[in-house]
Amino acid sequence: MPIANCKRCQRIFNKTRRDICPDCIAEEDAAFVAVRAYLREHKDATMAQVTEDTEVEIGIIISLIQDGRLILRDNPNLTYPCARCGAPTQAGRYCADCAKELTHELSVARTRLQKDGQGDAKRIGFYSKP
Ligand SMILES: [Zn+2]
Ligand SMILES: [Zn+2]
């Protein structure tokens, strides 16, 4: 059975389709339930309030949002910094502006590659979501 290092706690585990170990998955699931319930009650909560009241690590909350499990439609104050420019973001890795720019850069890169007639799939993949 293939093994891997857990992305979160670094422990070695039998690899599944997730890149974190079963313990961390359980922890993340519990965190998801707690944070979702909290946000339903506190629609104007900020990230600082959520982490303080639920005792869930900010990194877990962000990964739940980036994975698309936690949707912040009703929670306008809950934001985290864009991975590129640091602007407040509510979904994905990048703010709306950076997402737009990156999409533009990607299409420019694609056009350039098409002109060159040779592709570098790895470089293109850098811009797409993991
Ligand atoms: Zn783990
Ligand atoms: Zn940004």
Image (cartoon, rainbow, N blue to C red):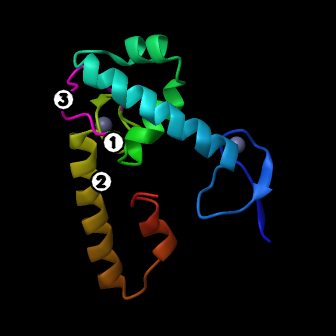
Position in image of residue 53 (x %, y %): 45, 11
Q: Quadrant of residue 33?
A: top left
Of labels 2 and 1, earlier in sequence is 1
| Above/below status of 31 relative to 19 | above
Which residue is under mark 1?
Answer: 94
Which residue is under mark 3?
Answer: 74
Is the distance from the Cβ of mark 2 to the nearest ligand 2 atom less than 8 Å? no
Q: Nearer the viewer, residue 91 or 54?
A: 54
Q: Which residues are magenta?
A: 71-81
| Above/below status of 90 relative to 52 | below
As drawn, the label of residue 102 is 2
Residue 73 inside the magenta-drawn segment: yes
- What residue appears at the point 39 percent right and 44 percent down from the top-left corner? 66
Q: Quadrant of residue 62?
A: top left
Q: Is residue 97 visible?
A: yes
Q: Nearer the viewer, mark 2 or mark 3?
A: 3
Residue 126 in the figure: left or right of residue 86: right
Q: Are marks 1 and 3 in contact (CB under 8 Å)?
A: no
Q: Say few, some or many: other residues with alpha carbon within 10 Å of mark 3 (under 14 / 14 to 19 / 20 or more).
A: few
Position in image of residue 52 (x %, y %): 47, 11
Q: Amino acid at mark 3?
A: Asp
Asked which secondary structure carries label 3, the reply is loop
Q: Nearer the viewer, mark 2 or mark 1?
A: 1
Residue 49 inside the magenta-drawn segment: no
Q: Alpha carbon of mark 2 to alpha carbon of mark 1: how far?
A: 9 Å
Of labels 1 and 3, earlier in sequence is 3
Q: Amino acid at mark 1?
A: Tyr
Q: Amino acid at mark 2?
A: Leu
Q: Which residue is outermost to the bottom? A: 117
Is the distance from the Cβ of mark 1 to the nearest ligand 2 atom less than 8 Å? yes
